[in-house]
């Protein structure tokens, strides 16, 4: 009987993942630049009142960038010796990219908060208007198929005087 050699697959790092701390730092700097640009593009689309489908697409496109950023930052953070051995110029570029991403993220968060506050003010104004109309126009209701009732104070119109005999 022939012997079959079975070799277990050796785990390989994912393709394109930087292996050394300097490579990770350079990749992280580039990724932070792309993420900052994407956040700025998303903010511009919100300011320009672009369709919701476009905003949803932009948010979905940002997700892989954010995940890659978290993974690269984690890999660099756990490599304390590699981080300490980075050249000063690379550390400065990394710090500058981090500041730029933080500033862009903070500006985006402020804009989104303002947009949310404006939307809440609009909803509050609509509710106040509806409540005011209900007070000044008794019997006024809102909803599907509703409107002022033709019989003030009544829930339904009076029943007809004749009935239908189904036995005939």
Image (cartoon, helix red, strand yellow):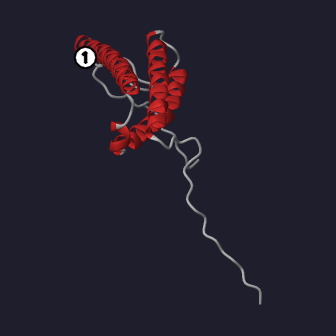
Relative vertical location of residue 156 with respect to residue 148 in this rendering, above or below: below
Q: In this view, does 30 lie to the left or right of 89?
A: right
Foreground: 117 or 130? 117
Q: In which quarter of the image is residue 39?
A: top left
Q: Where is residue 8 drawn, in percent x and y?
A: 60, 69
Q: Where is residue 30 drawn, in percent x and y?
A: 49, 26
Q: Quadrant of residue 66?
A: top left
> In the rendered image, is residue 149 in sight?
no
Identify the residue at horizontal 44%, vertical 10% (top origin): 47
Q: Which residue occupies the extreme left position in the image?
A: 135
Which residue in the protein does label 1 denote?
131
Q: What element carries label 1?
A: helix
Q: Rate crowding at label 1 as few (under 14), some (14 to 19) or many (20 or more) other CA atoms within 10 Å.
A: few
Foreground: 73 or 141? 73
Identify the residue at horizontal 38%, vertical 41% (top origin): 82
Q: Where is residue 51 drawn, in percent x and y?
A: 53, 17
Identify the residue at horizontal 36%, vertical 20% (top origin): 96
- Quarter of the rendering occupied by the N terminus: bottom right
Relative vertical location of residue 105 with respect to residue 72 in this rendering, above or below: above
Foreground: 72 or 131? 72
């Amino acid at each position: 009987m022939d012997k079959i050699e079975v070799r277990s697959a050796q785990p390989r790092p994912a393709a394109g993942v930087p292996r050394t701390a300097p490579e990770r730092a350079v990749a992280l700097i580039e990724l932070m630049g792309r993420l900052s640009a994407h956040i700025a593009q998303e903010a511009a689309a919100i300011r320009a009142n672009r369709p919701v489908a476009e905003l949803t697409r932009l948010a979905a496109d940002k997700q892989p960038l954010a995940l890659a950023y978290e993974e690269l930052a984690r890999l660099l953070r756990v490599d304390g010796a590699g981080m300490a051995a980075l050249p000063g110029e690379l550390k400065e570029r990394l710090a500058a990219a981090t500041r730029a991403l933080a500033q862009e993220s903070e500006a985006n968060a402020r804009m989104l908060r303002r947009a949310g506050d404006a939307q809440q003010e609009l909803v509050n104004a609509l509710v106040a208007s509806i409540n005011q109309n209900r007070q000044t126009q008794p019997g006024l209701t809102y909803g599907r198929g509703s409107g002022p009732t033709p019989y003030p104070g009544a829930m339904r119109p009076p029943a007809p005087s004749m009935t239908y005999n189904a036995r005939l």
